[in-house]
Image (cartoon, grey):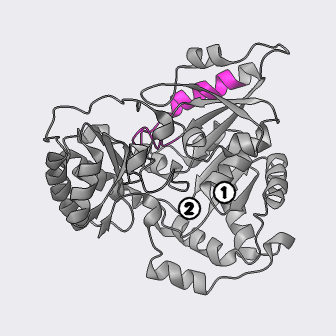
Amino acid sequence: MIDLRSDTVTTPTDAMRRAIANADVGDDVYGEDPSVNALEERVAQMFGHEAALYCVSGSLANLLAVRAVTPVGAEVLCDSRAHIVRAESGAHAAIGGVTTRTWTHSRGLAAVDEIDALVAPASSYFVSTATISVENTHNFGGGLVHSIDSLRAVRERADAQNLSVHLDGARIWNAHVATGVPLTEYGGVADVLAVCLSKGLGAPVGSLVIGSREHIAEAREWRRRLGAAWRQAGVLAAAGHHALDHHIDRLADDHAHAQLVAEACGIDPASVESNIVVVPGADARAVVEAARAEGVLIGAIDPRTVRLLTHLDVSRADAERAANVLARALKQGGLTPPRSETPPYRKPADESEDSMYDDRLLPHSQRLRRSPRSHR
Protein backbone atom coordinates (compact mmCIF):
# COMPACT_ATOMS: atom_id res chain seq x y z
CA MET A 1 0.00 0.00 0.00
CA ILE A 2 1.05 3.57 -0.71
CA ASP A 3 -0.27 5.50 2.28
CA LEU A 4 -1.05 9.15 1.52
CA ARG A 5 -3.62 9.69 4.26
CA SER A 6 -1.20 11.82 6.30
CA ASP A 7 2.48 12.50 6.84
CA THR A 8 1.98 11.13 10.36
CA VAL A 9 2.12 7.57 9.00
CA THR A 10 5.88 7.62 8.47
CA THR A 11 7.96 4.94 10.17
CA PRO A 12 11.51 5.37 11.53
CA THR A 13 14.33 4.75 9.09
CA ASP A 14 16.97 2.16 9.95
CA ALA A 15 19.41 4.95 10.85
CA MET A 16 16.82 6.54 13.12
CA ARG A 17 16.22 3.20 14.83
CA ARG A 18 19.95 2.94 15.52
CA ALA A 19 19.90 6.43 17.04
CA ILE A 20 17.00 5.38 19.27
CA ALA A 21 18.83 2.24 20.37
CA ASN A 22 21.94 4.22 21.32
CA ALA A 23 20.17 7.12 23.05
CA ASP A 24 21.50 8.62 26.28
CA VAL A 25 18.58 8.70 28.71
CA GLY A 26 17.66 9.84 32.21
CA ASP A 27 14.55 10.85 34.13
CA ASP A 28 12.98 13.84 32.40
CA VAL A 29 10.69 14.62 35.35
CA TYR A 30 13.87 15.38 37.29
CA GLY A 31 15.27 17.25 34.29
CA GLU A 32 17.97 14.60 33.91
CA ASP A 33 17.41 13.19 30.42
CA PRO A 34 20.37 14.50 28.40
CA SER A 35 18.80 13.74 25.03
CA VAL A 36 15.59 15.59 25.90
CA ASN A 37 17.46 18.54 27.41
CA ALA A 38 19.65 18.84 24.33
CA LEU A 39 16.65 18.62 22.00
CA GLU A 40 14.76 21.33 23.87
CA GLU A 41 17.77 23.64 23.88
CA ARG A 42 18.50 22.93 20.22
CA VAL A 43 14.99 23.62 18.95
CA ALA A 44 14.62 26.77 21.06
CA GLN A 45 17.82 28.13 19.53
CA MET A 46 16.72 27.17 16.01
CA PHE A 47 13.74 29.51 16.38
CA GLY A 48 15.52 32.23 18.35
CA HIS A 49 13.69 31.67 21.64
CA GLU A 50 14.85 31.05 25.18
CA ALA A 51 13.37 27.65 25.93
CA ALA A 52 11.32 24.72 24.66
CA LEU A 53 9.36 21.79 26.06
CA TYR A 54 9.24 18.32 24.48
CA CYS A 55 5.70 16.88 24.33
CA VAL A 56 4.02 13.75 23.12
CA SER A 57 1.85 15.31 20.39
CA GLY A 58 1.12 18.40 18.34
CA SER A 59 -2.30 18.80 19.90
CA LEU A 60 -0.78 18.81 23.38
CA ALA A 61 1.90 21.27 22.27
CA ASN A 62 -0.78 23.61 20.91
CA LEU A 63 -2.84 23.29 24.08
CA LEU A 64 0.14 24.10 26.30
CA ALA A 65 1.32 26.94 24.07
CA VAL A 66 -2.07 28.64 23.89
CA ARG A 67 -2.63 28.13 27.62
CA ALA A 68 0.71 29.76 28.41
CA VAL A 69 -0.30 33.06 26.78
CA THR A 70 -4.10 33.06 27.15
CA PRO A 71 -5.79 33.54 30.53
CA VAL A 72 -8.77 31.40 31.47
CA GLY A 73 -11.93 33.04 30.16
CA ALA A 74 -10.18 34.97 27.39
CA GLU A 75 -10.41 34.33 23.66
CA VAL A 76 -8.15 33.37 20.78
CA LEU A 77 -8.66 34.77 17.27
CA CYS A 78 -7.91 32.33 14.46
CA ASP A 79 -9.04 30.98 11.10
CA SER A 80 -12.29 29.01 11.01
CA ARG A 81 -10.37 26.04 9.58
CA ALA A 82 -7.52 26.21 12.10
CA HIS A 83 -6.44 22.90 13.55
CA ILE A 84 -6.94 24.22 17.08
CA VAL A 85 -10.60 24.81 16.23
CA ARG A 86 -11.50 21.82 14.10
CA ALA A 87 -9.25 18.97 15.08
CA GLU A 88 -8.26 19.07 18.74
CA SER A 89 -11.45 17.74 20.34
CA GLY A 90 -12.40 21.08 21.87
CA ALA A 91 -9.44 20.87 24.24
CA HIS A 92 -8.80 24.61 24.35
CA ALA A 93 -12.27 25.19 25.74
CA ALA A 94 -12.64 22.01 27.78
CA ILE A 95 -9.17 22.08 29.36
CA GLY A 96 -7.63 25.47 28.65
CA GLY A 97 -10.75 27.44 29.53
CA VAL A 98 -10.45 29.68 26.47
CA THR A 99 -12.83 30.41 23.62
CA THR A 100 -12.13 31.04 19.95
CA ARG A 101 -13.49 33.62 17.55
CA THR A 102 -12.75 33.05 13.91
CA TRP A 103 -12.28 34.63 10.53
CA THR A 104 -12.72 32.78 7.23
CA HIS A 105 -10.26 33.43 4.43
CA SER A 106 -9.35 31.41 1.35
CA ARG A 107 -5.70 31.30 2.42
CA GLY A 108 -6.39 30.92 6.11
CA LEU A 109 -5.00 34.29 7.16
CA ALA A 110 -7.19 37.38 7.15
CA ALA A 111 -5.92 40.88 6.45
CA VAL A 112 -4.81 42.66 9.58
CA ASP A 113 -7.69 45.13 9.32
CA GLU A 114 -10.13 42.21 9.41
CA ILE A 115 -8.35 40.82 12.45
CA ASP A 116 -8.50 44.23 14.08
CA ALA A 117 -12.27 44.23 13.68
CA LEU A 118 -12.50 40.98 15.62
CA VAL A 119 -10.65 42.23 18.69
CA ALA A 120 -13.20 42.65 21.47
CA PRO A 121 -13.61 46.17 22.85
CA ALA A 122 -12.71 46.67 26.48
CA SER A 123 -15.92 45.98 28.38
CA SER A 124 -17.14 43.76 31.17
CA TYR A 125 -19.78 42.47 28.73
CA PHE A 126 -17.31 41.01 26.23
CA VAL A 127 -14.87 38.14 26.31
CA SER A 128 -11.39 39.64 26.45
CA THR A 129 -9.25 39.00 23.37
CA ALA A 130 -5.80 37.76 24.39
CA THR A 131 -4.17 35.89 21.50
CA ILE A 132 -4.01 35.65 17.72
CA SER A 133 -3.26 32.15 16.43
CA VAL A 134 -1.92 31.47 12.94
CA GLU A 135 -1.08 28.14 11.30
CA ASN A 136 1.84 27.69 8.89
CA THR A 137 1.65 25.63 6.76
CA HIS A 138 -2.15 25.58 6.83
CA ASN A 139 -3.43 22.02 7.10
CA PHE A 140 -7.05 22.41 5.99
CA GLY A 141 -5.97 25.09 3.54
CA GLY A 142 -4.15 22.47 1.51
CA GLY A 143 -0.67 23.11 2.84
CA LEU A 144 -0.70 26.81 1.98
CA VAL A 145 2.39 28.72 3.11
CA HIS A 146 1.89 32.16 4.65
CA SER A 147 4.44 34.74 3.58
CA ILE A 148 6.75 36.04 6.26
CA ASP A 149 5.55 39.57 5.48
CA SER A 150 1.94 38.64 6.25
CA LEU A 151 3.02 37.04 9.51
CA ARG A 152 5.07 40.11 10.45
CA ALA A 153 2.00 42.26 9.80
CA VAL A 154 0.03 40.13 12.26
CA ARG A 155 2.86 40.46 14.78
CA GLU A 156 2.91 44.24 14.45
CA ARG A 157 -0.85 44.52 14.82
CA ALA A 158 -0.80 42.18 17.82
CA ASP A 159 1.83 44.35 19.48
CA ALA A 160 -0.29 47.43 18.85
CA GLN A 161 -3.28 45.72 20.49
CA ASN A 162 -1.21 44.19 23.33
CA LEU A 163 -2.05 40.67 22.16
CA SER A 164 0.06 37.52 22.09
CA VAL A 165 0.74 35.51 18.92
CA HIS A 166 0.63 31.72 18.82
CA LEU A 167 2.07 29.99 15.75
CA ASP A 168 0.89 26.45 15.07
CA GLY A 169 3.99 25.34 13.22
CA ALA A 170 3.28 21.64 13.04
CA ARG A 171 4.62 21.78 9.48
CA ILE A 172 6.77 24.90 9.80
CA TRP A 173 9.68 22.87 8.44
CA ASN A 174 7.77 22.57 5.15
CA ALA A 175 7.23 26.33 5.08
CA HIS A 176 10.94 26.89 5.75
CA VAL A 177 11.99 24.60 2.90
CA ALA A 178 9.37 25.97 0.50
CA THR A 179 10.33 29.62 1.05
CA GLY A 180 13.90 29.62 2.33
CA VAL A 181 12.80 31.86 5.21
CA PRO A 182 15.07 31.15 8.21
CA LEU A 183 13.44 29.44 11.17
CA THR A 184 14.53 32.31 13.41
CA GLU A 185 12.37 34.68 11.35
CA TYR A 186 9.34 32.47 11.87
CA GLY A 187 10.21 32.35 15.55
CA GLY A 188 10.36 36.12 15.64
CA VAL A 189 6.69 36.58 14.73
CA ALA A 190 5.34 34.54 17.65
CA ASP A 191 5.39 34.60 21.43
CA VAL A 192 4.87 30.84 21.49
CA LEU A 193 5.15 28.17 18.80
CA ALA A 194 4.27 24.50 18.54
CA VAL A 195 6.40 22.48 16.11
CA CYS A 196 6.16 18.80 15.25
CA LEU A 197 8.87 16.22 14.59
CA SER A 198 6.60 13.29 13.72
CA LYS A 199 5.08 14.53 10.45
CA GLY A 200 7.31 15.43 7.55
CA LEU A 201 10.47 14.94 9.60
CA GLY A 202 9.59 11.30 10.19
CA ALA A 203 10.20 10.89 13.94
CA PRO A 204 7.82 8.39 15.58
CA VAL A 205 6.66 10.75 18.35
CA GLY A 206 7.09 14.29 19.53
CA SER A 207 6.34 18.00 19.28
CA LEU A 208 7.81 20.98 21.10
CA VAL A 209 6.41 24.14 22.64
CA ILE A 210 8.78 27.07 22.13
CA GLY A 211 8.79 30.41 23.92
CA SER A 212 10.25 32.44 26.76
CA ARG A 213 11.48 30.78 29.95
CA GLU A 214 8.36 32.01 31.72
CA HIS A 215 6.01 30.62 29.09
CA ILE A 216 7.79 27.27 29.03
CA ALA A 217 7.70 27.06 32.83
CA GLU A 218 3.93 27.56 32.62
CA ALA A 219 3.67 24.95 29.88
CA ARG A 220 5.76 22.48 31.88
CA GLU A 221 3.47 22.89 34.91
CA TRP A 222 0.41 22.26 32.76
CA ARG A 223 2.01 19.24 31.11
CA ARG A 224 2.54 17.75 34.54
CA ARG A 225 -0.99 18.67 35.61
CA LEU A 226 -2.37 16.78 32.61
CA GLY A 227 -0.38 13.67 33.43
CA ALA A 228 1.79 14.11 30.34
CA ALA A 229 5.23 14.36 31.96
CA TRP A 230 7.47 11.48 30.99
CA ARG A 231 10.53 9.66 32.20
CA GLN A 232 13.21 8.22 29.88
CA ALA A 233 11.92 10.11 26.85
CA GLY A 234 15.43 10.34 25.44
CA VAL A 235 14.78 7.27 23.30
CA LEU A 236 12.25 9.40 21.43
CA ALA A 237 14.25 12.61 21.60
CA ALA A 238 17.10 10.77 19.87
CA ALA A 239 14.79 10.18 16.92
CA GLY A 240 14.02 13.89 16.93
CA HIS A 241 17.71 14.77 16.79
CA HIS A 242 18.18 12.39 13.86
CA ALA A 243 15.21 13.93 12.05
CA LEU A 244 16.61 17.44 12.48
CA ASP A 245 20.02 16.28 11.27
CA HIS A 246 18.85 14.43 8.17
CA HIS A 247 15.23 15.06 7.19
CA ILE A 248 14.68 18.81 6.82
CA ASP A 249 16.21 19.51 3.40
CA ARG A 250 14.66 16.39 1.88
CA LEU A 251 11.17 17.89 2.41
CA ALA A 252 11.69 19.48 -1.01
CA ASP A 253 11.27 15.98 -2.46
CA ASP A 254 7.89 15.67 -0.76
CA HIS A 255 6.80 18.99 -2.24
CA ALA A 256 7.86 17.89 -5.73
CA HIS A 257 6.01 14.60 -5.32
CA ALA A 258 2.89 16.45 -4.20
CA GLN A 259 2.99 18.60 -7.33
CA LEU A 260 3.39 15.51 -9.49
CA VAL A 261 0.31 13.90 -7.95
CA ALA A 262 -1.63 17.16 -8.05
CA GLU A 263 -1.14 17.51 -11.79
CA ALA A 264 -2.59 14.03 -12.35
CA CYS A 265 -5.58 15.11 -10.25
CA GLY A 266 -6.21 18.17 -12.41
CA ILE A 267 -4.76 20.59 -9.88
CA ASP A 268 -2.36 23.30 -11.04
CA PRO A 269 1.00 22.14 -9.62
CA ALA A 270 1.98 25.76 -8.99
CA SER A 271 -0.87 26.04 -6.49
CA VAL A 272 0.59 23.23 -4.36
CA GLU A 273 2.94 24.99 -1.98
CA SER A 274 4.09 22.13 0.24
CA ASN A 275 3.21 18.45 0.69
CA ILE A 276 -0.60 18.59 0.92
CA VAL A 277 -2.98 18.20 -2.02
CA VAL A 278 -6.71 18.86 -1.65
CA VAL A 279 -8.97 17.78 -4.53
CA PRO A 280 -12.59 19.00 -4.43
CA GLY A 281 -15.45 18.15 -6.75
CA ALA A 282 -15.80 14.36 -6.73
CA ASP A 283 -17.67 11.76 -4.68
CA ALA A 284 -15.06 11.37 -1.95
CA ARG A 285 -16.25 7.95 -0.80
CA ALA A 286 -16.06 6.58 -4.33
CA VAL A 287 -12.60 8.07 -4.88
CA VAL A 288 -11.24 6.76 -1.58
CA GLU A 289 -12.60 3.26 -2.22
CA ALA A 290 -11.38 3.16 -5.82
CA ALA A 291 -7.89 4.26 -4.80
CA ARG A 292 -7.79 1.75 -1.96
CA ALA A 293 -8.73 -1.04 -4.37
CA GLU A 294 -5.58 -0.22 -6.35
CA GLY A 295 -3.33 0.02 -3.31
CA VAL A 296 -3.35 3.76 -2.56
CA LEU A 297 -4.72 5.12 0.71
CA ILE A 298 -6.07 8.67 0.80
CA GLY A 299 -8.52 10.45 3.08
CA ALA A 300 -11.47 12.82 2.86
CA ILE A 301 -12.19 16.23 4.29
CA ASP A 302 -15.87 16.23 3.37
CA PRO A 303 -18.19 14.22 1.09
CA ARG A 304 -16.91 16.03 -2.02
CA THR A 305 -13.24 16.60 -1.17
CA VAL A 306 -10.27 14.25 -0.82
CA ARG A 307 -6.89 15.05 0.68
CA LEU A 308 -3.49 13.42 0.34
CA LEU A 309 -0.03 14.06 1.73
CA THR A 310 3.38 13.04 0.46
CA HIS A 311 6.09 12.19 2.99
CA LEU A 312 9.32 10.42 3.85
CA ASP A 313 7.97 6.95 3.01
CA VAL A 314 6.75 7.96 -0.48
CA SER A 315 9.36 7.62 -3.21
CA ARG A 316 9.25 9.20 -6.66
CA ALA A 317 8.09 5.86 -8.06
CA ASP A 318 5.36 5.69 -5.41
CA ALA A 319 4.21 9.19 -6.32
CA GLU A 320 4.08 8.33 -10.02
CA ARG A 321 2.07 5.18 -9.34
CA ALA A 322 -0.27 7.02 -6.98
CA ALA A 323 -0.79 9.73 -9.60
CA ASN A 324 -1.97 7.17 -12.15
CA VAL A 325 -4.24 5.46 -9.62
CA LEU A 326 -5.79 8.72 -8.46
CA ALA A 327 -6.49 9.90 -12.00
CA ARG A 328 -8.56 6.75 -12.49
CA ALA A 329 -10.15 6.96 -9.05
CA LEU A 330 -11.27 10.54 -9.61
CA LYS A 331 -12.99 9.52 -12.83
CA GLN A 332 -14.89 6.88 -10.88
CA GLY A 333 -15.84 9.58 -8.39
CA GLY A 334 -17.30 11.76 -11.11
CA LEU A 335 -14.36 14.12 -11.71
CA THR A 336 -12.43 13.96 -14.96
CA PRO A 337 -8.95 15.49 -14.74
CA PRO A 338 -7.29 17.55 -15.97
CA ARG A 339 -9.09 20.77 -15.12
CA SER A 340 -7.78 24.23 -15.91
CA GLU A 341 -7.46 25.48 -12.36
CA THR A 342 -7.99 24.52 -8.74
CA PRO A 343 -11.54 25.31 -7.59
CA PRO A 344 -11.77 27.71 -4.64
CA TYR A 345 -12.19 26.38 -1.14
CA ARG A 346 -15.77 25.37 -0.42
CA LYS A 347 -16.83 25.23 3.20
CA PRO A 348 -18.63 21.96 4.06
CA ALA A 349 -22.38 22.35 4.46
CA ASP A 350 -22.14 21.16 8.04
CA GLU A 351 -18.79 21.61 9.77
CA SER A 352 -19.87 19.43 12.69
CA GLU A 353 -20.32 16.48 10.34
CA ASP A 354 -16.90 16.82 8.79
CA SER A 355 -15.26 13.45 8.25
CA MET A 356 -11.80 14.70 9.25
CA TYR A 357 -9.85 12.77 6.65
CA ASP A 358 -11.57 9.52 7.50
CA ASP A 359 -12.62 7.35 4.58
CA ARG A 360 -15.83 6.40 6.35
CA LEU A 361 -17.83 9.33 5.14
CA LEU A 362 -21.09 11.12 5.69
CA PRO A 363 -24.01 10.95 6.22
CA HIS A 364 -23.81 9.86 9.83
CA SER A 365 -25.82 6.70 9.19
CA GLN A 366 -23.10 5.49 6.83
CA ARG A 367 -20.19 6.06 9.22
CA LEU A 368 -18.73 3.38 11.41
CA ARG A 369 -17.79 5.76 14.21
CA ARG A 370 -18.86 9.17 15.42
CA SER A 371 -15.77 11.26 14.87
CA PRO A 372 -12.07 10.50 14.46
CA ARG A 373 -10.00 12.16 17.13
CA SER A 374 -6.34 11.96 16.31
CA HIS A 375 -5.85 12.69 12.63
CA ARG A 376 -3.69 15.67 11.97
Q: Looking at this view, is 80 or 53 the one in front?
A: 80
Q: Looking at this view, is 106 or 365 the one in front?
A: 365
Q: Which mark is residue 208?
A: 1
Left or right placement of residue 127 versus residue 17 in this view: right
Q: Are marks 2 and 1 in contact (CB under 8 Å)?
A: yes
Q: Amino acid at mark 2?
A: Leu
**Residue assigned mark 2:** 197
User: Measured from the top left, where is residue 62 in percent x and y?
Assistant: 66, 48
Q: Looking at this view, is 91 or 115 the one in front?
A: 91
Q: Residue at x 58, y 24 (%)?
A: 153
Q: Residue at x 69, y 52 (%)?
A: 209
User: Measured from the top left, where is residue 157 in percent x and y?
Assistant: 66, 21
Q: Residue at x 66, y 63 (%)?
A: 56
Secondary structure under tag 2 reads loop
Q: Residue at x 70, y 50 (%)?
A: 210
Q: Which residues are magenta?
A: 136-158
Residue 319, quarter of picture: bottom left
Magenta stretch: includes residue 139: yes
Report crowding for label 2: few under 14, some 14 to 19, many 20 or more residues within 10 A (C-alpha): many
Secondary structure under tag 1 reads strand
Left or right placement of residue 1 versus residue 230 in this view: left
Q: Quadrant of the N terminus?
A: bottom left
Q: Would you say residue 160 is visible in this rendering?
A: yes
User: Measured from the top left, where is residue 236 in percent x and y?
Assistant: 63, 74
User: Measured from the top left, where is residue 328 in percent x and y?
Assistant: 14, 53
Q: Which mark is residue 341?
A: none
